Amino acid sequence: MGNKFSILDGKQLNIDQIEGRFAAFAKVPYAVTLRLSRPIAEDGYGTITVNGVKIPKGTQFLMDMMVKMHCLMVPVGSVAREYGKEYTMRLTGFKGEDGKPFPNTVLKFKTMERPQRDHAYDSHDEVAIWAAREGMVLLQNENEVLPLREDAVLNCFGSAQFCFRNTATGAGLINPRWQANFHQSIEEHSSFKVNREISDLYVQLRDVVPSDAVLRRAKELSDTALILLSRHSGEFSDNRPVKGGYYLTDDERAMIRAVSKAFSKTVAILNTGYPIEMGWVKEFGIDAVLYTGFAGMGAGYALMEILDGRTNPSGKLPDTWSYDYYDNPSAYNFINLPADHKQVGEKDFGVHLFYQEDIYVGYRYFDTFNKPAAYGFGHGKSYTSFDISFREPVNGIEHITVEAAVCNTGSRPGKEVLQLYIQPPEGTIEKPKRVLTAFEKTALLAPGESRKLTLIAPKKAFASFCEQTGAFVLEAGEYRIWAGNSLENSRIIGSFTLNETRVLAKTNRINLPVEPFKRLTRSDPTVEEASKIVPLEERIQKPAPRPVYAPTALPVYKGKKITFDKLKANPALLDNFVAQMRTDELCRLNVCGGADWYMPWQTGAAGKTNVIRKYRMPKMMVSDGNTGLNLKKRNIGFPSSCTVAASFNKELAYSIGKVIAEESREHRIGMNLGPAMNIHRNILNGRHPEYFSEDPYLGGIMAGYHGKGLEENGCGCTYKHLFCNGSDTSRKASQSIVSERALREIYFKVFEFAVDVHKPSAVMTSYNGVNGIYPAENADILQTLLREEWGLDSMIMTDWGTYDTVDPVEMVKAGNCWLTEGGGKYVRILQKAVKEGKLSRAVLEHNVRQLVKTVLKWDS
Ligand code: BGC
């Protein structure tokens, strides 16, 4: 085969999808992916033009999934901008690694027609727009520059106006039925006019500084400037503390400086997947800052409504926004790759991450150590004002209850969020200053309208974990109760005193660190840079002992064949149904039947159960994720979960789950691979937008309602990724080294709160190891914690391809019921292990029993 290029990703380019699922490789607005017959030589990169315009250099990579392919992503985004148009790409002067030239090639690709709204789905789409409206956070609004007049002329600065992002990538990617980008939203959903002279400067996606004359003319049209900044974020790669990542680029700074000098009113719109540096807001005297996050298919419409005041912002920050990245203690123990470090794969090297900040994650650090932050946890402004009063808290046995009244004292309708924090006493165990223990949001209150709300704080939400005794305790002393509409705006509304220490729950001692490491404390609030990259073979620094799971075999079944229909009619036959199977059949069911995302004709589902025809077992299909269905067919597109968390609205989280369930059923998806709810330990985690919060209570409660919404409306849910999946750099070979207390109070806790709201049908283990063993192969986690302590009767699955770095037999032995994404190879590995006496039939039976139970509920 000679050298050649061919178009890989279909001939219809989705120009609404700024970045596709594998965007981490591209880092550009949408790209056409070419398949290469051979890799291009390092000095062999030629010239690419689209309709005669030169295209910047693309990214070459090896797609190493089920089939290996050399690919080149060609960033055509700045040229191929029109819907339904054919473009011609010319490639000249390329040379392969084998020294042979690629022939000059002409390829045609077509952009898609713009999808139109399908009114049959209006009620679903309304939930998406609702989520976008409530998830955006008004960080500041000096001199009330927002809202703008509804017929204002918009002077829009920044390339982000032409690559306005509404989705994360990877498992958090949406493929919505319709959406409107920034400029379409202005046209379709506002009476604003656009100053084209300014906007046209940014079509080429460069953050240029307009000339003085252009700025002068713009100022005559309106004295307000909108500055748009955007940052991609998604699965597969972490963000970096570099210019263009966490920090502003030189071009952005120059543009902001010039604009803030020229205009008397400035509004910054942060369309970023994660918090970015914030010092520039003060430096350049920006008046208003609005954080849109990735707000899904309704993002543009919601943004217009907030800008012109039809919607009053009510979002609150689910994370602390520091001034600088290095204000966060976890910054020193994350792998902060430099800008020029090439994209890393999933297992290029081992990573040791020391969680030295310990329990002081997010606001627990800033609040306890009085570290100033640009915008604190729970903060978010409104266009109206509220008067909030709290009654004396009632101290029950398991809960603190507080009645509150909220009155809208301003002139616009609005919603307010009440937050309850508890400050535990100083005791023998040191504690964070305050922790969130309850929150509620009002309905829309008209000016002058009042509403009563009840806040109920479970005591377990503020118990401390004692490492001496392995118990959650409430230490003796005074507990102060703080309440308000943000952490910062809270005030003490009461207190209660415990005369003696109360043990709330004893736990099993599991997954403890196997090596000593420094931990940040009140008396020594410093960290050392200990995290490091190591050779792949050293990914587990010091292995933890491997716990054993030894269930008893099911009673032998010698009766008549039981088919799935019979089982469905009589679920009491479950044990016999499983016991009748041959061991090789059990092995087959313990492995996933592969993903349907490689071939153009496949649906894009992430996996399906293997079926065994003789029992007439149906297939159960699964698909990602938190924001909709990650399928090739267009469907609902919700905001990323971090934006949903900012709504602080449990009813909304439930409704999101409900809509995803309804659409899943339409697409014959039995189980959703979400919600993902890992803690925002470090703001540069690539999956930051996909996860909810830095706070386990907020994250767990919102995720729990999302899961409940899914399962009460016909679709299974999967809590993922257990545990500590807090970074994506070489994620399959990354190990989190974390104290028992931080696991119990933060990293396990978020899942525990979600389980308290709703018990999921499935859980997914994480790629990373924790304390010298991978959770996927840790029977202490899978059996003792999940089943015994939390009472979960769920199916446990691995994350996709965990077996790349973890022994598949060990995962099954620990009770992992589904090796994903699977394939015949893994069935054979299990069969061999049975033959060699390394894997018992009893374990396979118990795993398959869980799986069959799940299929019974959610078969597609
Ligand atoms: C992600 C999971 C996802 C799975 C299937 C993995 O890469 O980590 O969150 O559910 O793929 O798509």
Image (tube, helix red, strand yellow):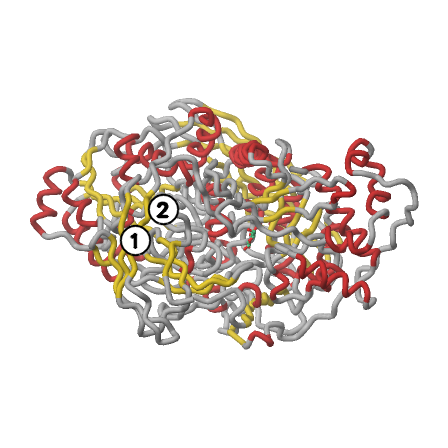
* Contact? badges 1 and 2 (CB < 8 Å): yes
Q: Residue at x 77, y 65 (%)?
A: 833
Q: Circle 1: is it few (<14), some (14-19), or many (20+) Cα within 10 Å?
A: many
Q: Circle 2: is it few (<14), some (14-19), or many (20+) Cα within 10 Å?
A: many
* Residue 400 in sight from this viewpoint: no
Asked whether, in this view, residue 435 is left or right of residue 285, the answer is right
Residue 382: mark: none
Residue 181 image point, x, y percent: 32, 40
Question: Which quadrant is home to the N terminus?
Answer: bottom left
Residue ranking furthest to the left = 213
Q: Mark 2 = which residue?
A: 13
Q: Residue at x 69, y 54 (%)?
A: 591
Q: Mark 1 = which residue?
A: 76
Residue ranking furthest to the front = 1
Q: Quadrant of residue 396?
A: top right
- The mark that comes first in sequence, 1 or 2, is 2
